[in-house]
Image (cartoon, coloured by chain):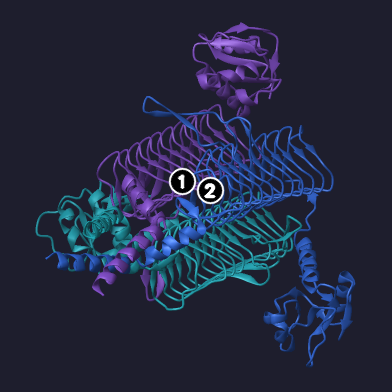
Chain colours: A purple, B cyan, C blue
Amino acid sequence: MMEISARQIAEILNGTIEGDPDVKVNHLSKIEEGVEGSISFLSNPLYTHYIYSTQASITIVNNDFYPTQPISSTLIKVEKAEMAFAKLLEFYNQIKNNKSGISEKCTISKSAKIGTNLYIGDFTFIGDNAKIGDNVKIYPQVYIGDNSVIGDNTTIFAGVKIYSDNLIGKDCIIHAGTIIGSDGFRFAPQNGENLKIAQIGNVIIEDDVEIGANCAIDRATLGSTIIRKGVKFDNLIHIAHNVEVGEYSFIAANSIIAGSTKIGKNCMLAGQVGIIGHLTIADGTIIAAQSGISKSIKKTNETFMGSPAFEINDYRKSYIHFKNFSKILERLDKLEKELNQRNS
Amino acid sequence: MMEISARQIAEILNGTIEGDPDVKVNHLSKIEEGVEGSISFLSNPLYTHYIYSTQASITIVNNDFYPTQPISSTLIKVEKAEMAFAKLLEFYNQIKNNKSGISEKCTISKSAKIGTNLYIGDFTFIGDNAKIGDNVKIYPQVYIGDNSVIGDNTTIFAGVKIYSDNLIGKDCIIHAGTIIGSDGFRFAPQNGENLKIAQIGNVIIEDDVEIGANCAIDRATLGSTIIRKGVKFDNLIHIAHNVEVGEYSFIAANSIIAGSTKIGKNCMLAGQVGIIGHLTIADGTIIAAQSGISKSIKKTNETFMGSPAFEINDYRKSYIHFKNFSKILERLDKLEKELNQRNS
Amino acid sequence: MMEISARQIAEILNGTIEGDPDVKVNHLSKIEEGVEGSISFLSNPLYTHYIYSTQASITIVNNDFYPTQPISSTLIKVEKAEMAFAKLLEFYNQIKNNKSGISEKCTISKSAKIGTNLYIGDFTFIGDNAKIGDNVKIYPQVYIGDNSVIGDNTTIFAGVKIYSDNLIGKDCIIHAGTIIGSDGFRFAPQNGENLKIAQIGNVIIEDDVEIGANCAIDRATLGSTIIRKGVKFDNLIHIAHNVEVGEYSFIAANSIIAGSTKIGKNCMLAGQVGIIGHLTIADGTIIAAQSGISKSIKKTNETFMGSPAFEINDYRKSYIHFKNFSKILERLDKLEKELNQRNS
């Protein structure tokens, strides 16, 4: 990363300096891992003691922080240290991803319509009648099939494959290796074989969605598989044909949702969750890691666990008994013995 | 999609028209979601009431359907409406995937042998001595290693990577991002380190197999990992070295099969199933979602659930008791109390 | 594979021939699957009977093996037959992967520094200031982002995507489709939406690591996600931001580790294991397939099972009771009936 001085950072963050304004840093660190050349921040009072020992060259602190011992780090005081640091993170992230220009080694169909201020990397393929919005970044080796649409300000990392006819919204991020619009898994048994049912629907991804690496989102048989506004997916997630995921829902790594299931708004699925097909999951549902959902959930804002899952507190009680099962059986053995002795 | 008239569709389907033969449609829809410009179908009697309200411009119906109320939709009467609609789906699907020609931006080794009537997309790589059959479609950014063989009429979507020495049959479909022929996961512990065991076998995929997106099928250590005729895989499936999957078996998303296990014919694995190595699974076995198989299954056509799995009805009974575990413990507490009272 | 004679193999393995030194083979086989033209080995005494019936043209045996019946196979006698065969496997593997030269169809940034004796395949992209060591093999369609470093003797198979700023060690193998350095899954809820927290850390992979196909390893928010020396990953594994996996640990297919968790040395995770975030797992921990770890593990060399997991023998006992739950309930029913009868 590039080097930047305390003075420059204070300007970016609209903060005031206590210490050496000319000290320079070239990376960001946690306060407990601060080293010379790094900038850190202090926000949580539980971490205050670290500021007296940190080797970070610069530390961002809240305006109301007053040291009680000498500090070697140069301080930059701001209104909210944590948010200021997040701003710095974002600043560095933009430098990292600051790509522009259209490669001469990519393919863009003559019938595709492309916007302005684009990055399109080497060996990327954009098919017939595709539409690419403004300020879009498409990294190398991406495939965008015929008629697919990419909204303004969206970033698509290396190697993503988007089949034909899919719609991706604005301000989305799609991570490397993810597949969008592959065929739904539908076959009709016939004479001992399995006839493929053609999958001619598509995938619609609304605005402000982020999708992790190596996910697979199938197109609908008819109609659309829909990922609503603000949804966030982790890595290695499978979404089947005709699924709908409601606004602002979160899905952690390696979860799968089977065909035609509708997930509500603001739901949270932890890692390795499975949901069977044709269900409806109420808004605000939370599902614990490795759980399996086999029935629709109608009441909002409940939490579930187990495979098949039920209410989480009930599950935890049953599971404690399961762990103690040998002791419970000893009690049963003892009761039987007592009763037998009386009978004899 | 292109526009097509009722008259043209009736010709394709060998049907008769009731209504306006010149009305045009440009997409397919379910009857309950029909809109102007769409074509739908009615087959299931439970859906009959929808035909009096559907906005679909055309509806395909069985020859023996006679409306009892006025209908706005133009009807096309055929012998079997559902199969006629599937034919239309397939017709549209072929238009969607109607690619042809060999890109000037791909690499085909001089020693490779390629058939006729091919589609080979941009940035695809075909290695030394590879053989590509007739009517094969290979989308952009595919990698086909040395000596690998692709049978006639097979379609390989964007970004698939096939290592060297693997055999893919005829009439197969391999979805984007899938890896075939990566090394099996085998190491020999030695002096606290782990020596890699070279994996020099291959993968054989027989005819009429479909493999979903982002799967990983490892090559054999020696011999072959084999996917038999008619097998269908969903997305994100892992198949280890030397596994064999029997004819017409189905594997749903995100299931994994460990090394050297043999799966019988006509088996069905639901989502997120795991099977450990060196097992034999009988023909017709069904395994419920998220189950784990730790022993060979010898009796055919049984259904299993749980981790480790056992017979599904037994599992369900045990699981109902597990859900009621707190109540069962209350009964045990009560018995103990009663017996203690008598003892005192 | 190329043809090779018994005489040539005996030279490679420093062995002695009994039989025809001119017989030729072109592939390797197990002794029980030996056919004309194949070479096999006999090491395990339990397999000795196969040597009298094998059709393998050549069989490698230990020096102390003396046949008690006639054998059709030519024998090559060596000190340790199993290790000699492994050496042959490796010999064939090197032929299989014997690629060299830098493609004219790849992109290498002018600011990248590349070593000697390289293979860089078609349509591969190497970004600004990237560093590629000596004897590195990079197959087609790989993406290596800006500032990333690949150590000497490392092999990267087709379609791997490595984001910017990541460090890969020496003697590593990364299989096709794997993603390294994608953003960690971190968002801050704000006004009903979810603000992305920029992920500006990286991934460090130390020496002698092998990573399977279609894995996803996220970069750290700050600092590094670290995969230590000698670690081996199977396919479809997810590693979240800021995770650390200790030296020589093994992770089987489709396991996931959530953010900031530290795995010790010499651990073994079986398939489909999930570990939640911010835990510490002791050295030598073994985790059974499909288990979920929800608490830190402090004692070394223990084995766990279940979701949430506990000590494996305790789990197995509880699970046996779970399978017998209906019978246990019958005993409880009987006790209640007996007691009720006495009460009446």
Q: Position of residue C321 (x, y in %)?
A: 39, 64
- Give the Cα separation between the discs numbered 2 and 1: 8 Å
Query: How far from the left and from the top, in percent, is residue C39?
Result: 77, 77
Question: Cβ–Cβ below 8 Å for labels 2 and 1?
Answer: yes
Q: Is residue A41 above or below residue B266?
A: above
Residue located 36% across and 58% down the image: A328
| B285 or B84, nearer to the observer | B285
Is there any visible trace of residue A216 in the rendered image? yes
| Residue at mark 1 | A271
Which subunit holds the residue at mark 2? C
Query: Which residue has dot 2 on it?
Result: C256
Residue C304 located left or right of residue C329:
right
Residue C256 place in picture, x, y as percent:
53, 48
Q: Amino acid at mark 1?
A: Gly
Which chain is mark 1 on? A
Compared to residue A199, the image places residue A165 above or below, namely above
Instruction: Please identify the quadrant where the N terminus of chain A is shown.
Output: top right
Q: Nearer the viewer, residue A27 or C285?
A: C285
Give the SS element for disc 1: loop
Mark 2 residue crowding within 10 angstroms, few (<14) / some (14–19) / many (20+): many
Image point (15%, 68%), residue name: C341
Element assignment for label 2:
strand
